[in-house]
Amino acid sequence: MEIHRFEKAWLGFALLLIVGLIATITYGAVGPGVAMISDSGGTIDSSALGEHEQFSDPGVRQVGENEYDVYVVAQQFIFRPGTNEPITLPADSTVTFHVASADVIHGFSITGTNVNTMAIPGQVSKITVEFDDPQTYGLVCHEYCGAAHHEMAGTIEVVP
Ligand code: CUA
């Protein structure tokens, strides 16, 4: 069957739109001074975080010259660290967050950026972020996790 020339043109246009849409989603909306590099994880026993090598004492670990690992426990209704004490990191650093939930599903979203993940019981969410300039970021839980979900927030301080 012969494809009409007009139809062909519209088909091409539609394909272009689809490719454009995917490209926009893939490379879109990056927040100021921040770039999300990857989003992957592993498994964990959420009921035994206290016995975990890293999550029993969550916080910032320096792993390279400008590289840091940050272990964060999300639980009703705080981030440890983050809520009671800020997560403090130097500017011009590459930071991998490892986020584990101690109870239910939580969110982990750095406000004003495209950095966000979910903390699902039984899994570790791992995201790598580049922090360029000194700035204070908000950290919020963007998954409903119970009565005080709206109060579950924290702070990330990127310092010179
Ligand atoms: Cu934790 Cu919403």
Image: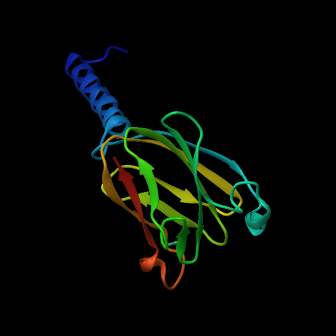
Q: Which residue is nearer to you in this view: 4 or 155?
A: 155
Residue 48: image location, x then y, percent: 78, 66
Task: Residue 15 in the image: state x and y as whole percent.
Answer: 32, 27
Residue farthest left in this picture: 6
Measured from the top left, where is residue 125 in percent x and y? 59, 52
Q: Name the residue nearer the viewer: 150 or 93.
A: 93
Residue at (31% x, 40% y) in the render = 28
Q: Residue at x 35, y 58 (%)?
A: 137
In the image: residue 5, left or right of residue 154? left
Coloring scheme used? rainbow
Position of 8 relative to 48 (above/below)? above
> How many tags in the picture?
0
Q: Give left or right: position of 82 versus 3.
A: right
Looking at the picture, tell me which residue is in the foreground, 160 or 77: 160
Q: Percent from the top left, x then y, of residue 84?
A: 49, 73
Q: In which quarter of the view is residue 49 placed?
A: bottom right
Residue at image point 28% right, 26% down: 16
> If the image is split into quadrants, where does the N terminus sit?
top left
Give the quarter of the image for residue 150: bottom left
Instruction: Spot the residue most to the front.
Output: 160
